[in-house]
Image (spheres, rainbow, N blue to C red):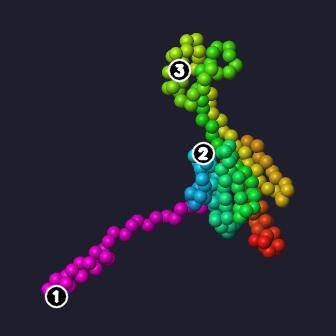
C-alpha cells in the first residue's frame, strides 16, 4: 500500500514537470493594441488604416507616450477623430472605395441601376435589351488634419499613406506640448 502511494505521487510529480509548455508568444505590437481598442462603427479596418495605426503606435512608443491615452473615434464617413487624454489631435481618413457596376442606357448621363458585384449586374442586364454594362472603378479617399497650435490646424488634402505616416510626428509633437502645458497649469 505504501509503495503504491509513493509510485502514484512520483507519477503525478513527473506529469507536473514534464507537461508541454505552450510556445512563447510575441507580445502584440503597439498598433495591434490600438486596433483592438477601435470600435468599427460599420466600417471594417482597411489595410492602409492598419499600416497607419501600426506607425502611429510605434511613434507613440518611441515618444514614451502611453497607448492608453489614445482614443480613435470612427465617424460615419469612415474618418477617425483622434484624441489623446482628452486632447483633440486631428483627423485621418484612409479609405479605398470599391468599384461599382452600372447599367446604362446609351446616351444617358445617369445609370439606370448600380450594383456592387458583376454577376447580379449581368443578370439584370439580360432583362434590359439595349442597355450596356459599365464598370466604375473605386477610388482612394484620403485626408489628414493635425493641430499646429491651440487654434490652428493644418489640412492635408488627398495625401498618400506615406504623407500621413510622415505627419504623425506633428501629432506627437502637439500631444507633448499640450501635456507640458497641462502639467504647468496643474490640470494634467
Q: Residue at x 75, y 71 (%)?
A: 188
Asked if residue 177 shows in the view, the reply is yes
Picture layout, residue 110 above or below residue 72 = above
Q: Residue 166's x, y, as percent?
A: 71, 53
Q: Is residue 33 left or right of residue 10?
A: right
Marks 3 and 2 close (CB-CB < 8 Å):
no
Q: How far apart, in angstroms, are the residues tagged by discs 1 and 3?
A: 84 Å
Counting from the top left corner in percent of width and height, residue 109 is at 70, 19
Q: CA distance from mark 3 to mark 2?
A: 28 Å
Extreme residue toward the left, this view: 1
Q: Which residue is mark 1?
A: 2
Please name the residue that numbered disc 3 is placed on: 124
Q: Which segment is the magenta one?
A: 1-30
Q: Is residue 107 magenta?
A: no
- Determine if the magenta segment contains residue 9: yes
Point out the tag, 2 or 1, that comes first from the N-terminus. Answer: 1
Amino acid at each position: 500500500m505504501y509503495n503504491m502511494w509513493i509510485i502514484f505521487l512520483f507519477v503525478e510529480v513527473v506529469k507536473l514537470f514534464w507537461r508541454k509548455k505552450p510556445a512563447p508568444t510575441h507580445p502584440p505590437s503597439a498598433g495591434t493594441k490600438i486596433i483592438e481598442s477601435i470600435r468599427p462603427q460599420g466600417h471594417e479596418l482597411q489595410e492602409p488604416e492598419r499600416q497607419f495605426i501600426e506607425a502611429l503606435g510605434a511613434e507613440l512608443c518611441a515618444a514614451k507616450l502611453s497607448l492608453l491615452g489614445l482614443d480613435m473615434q470612427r465617424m460615419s464617413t469612415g474618418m477617425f477623430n483622434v484624441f489623446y487624454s482628452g486632447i483633440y489631435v486631428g483627423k485621418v481618413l484612409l479609405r479605398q472605395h470599391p468599384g461599382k457596376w452600372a447599367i446604362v442606357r446609351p446616351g444617358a448621363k445617369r445609370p439606370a441601376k448600380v450594383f456592387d458585384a458583376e454577376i447580379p449586374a449581368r443578370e439584370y442586364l439580360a432583362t434590359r435589351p439595349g442597355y450596356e454594362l459599365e464598370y466604375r472603378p473605386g477610388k482612394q479617399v484620403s485626408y489628414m488634419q493635425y493641430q499646429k497650435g491651440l487654434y490652428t490646424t493644418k489640412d492635408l488634402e488627398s495625401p498618400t499613406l506615406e504623407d500621413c505616416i510622415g505627419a504623425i510626428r506633428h501629432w506627437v509633437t502637439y500631444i507633448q506640448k499640450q501635456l507640458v502645458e497641462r502639467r504647468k497649469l496643474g490640470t494634467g
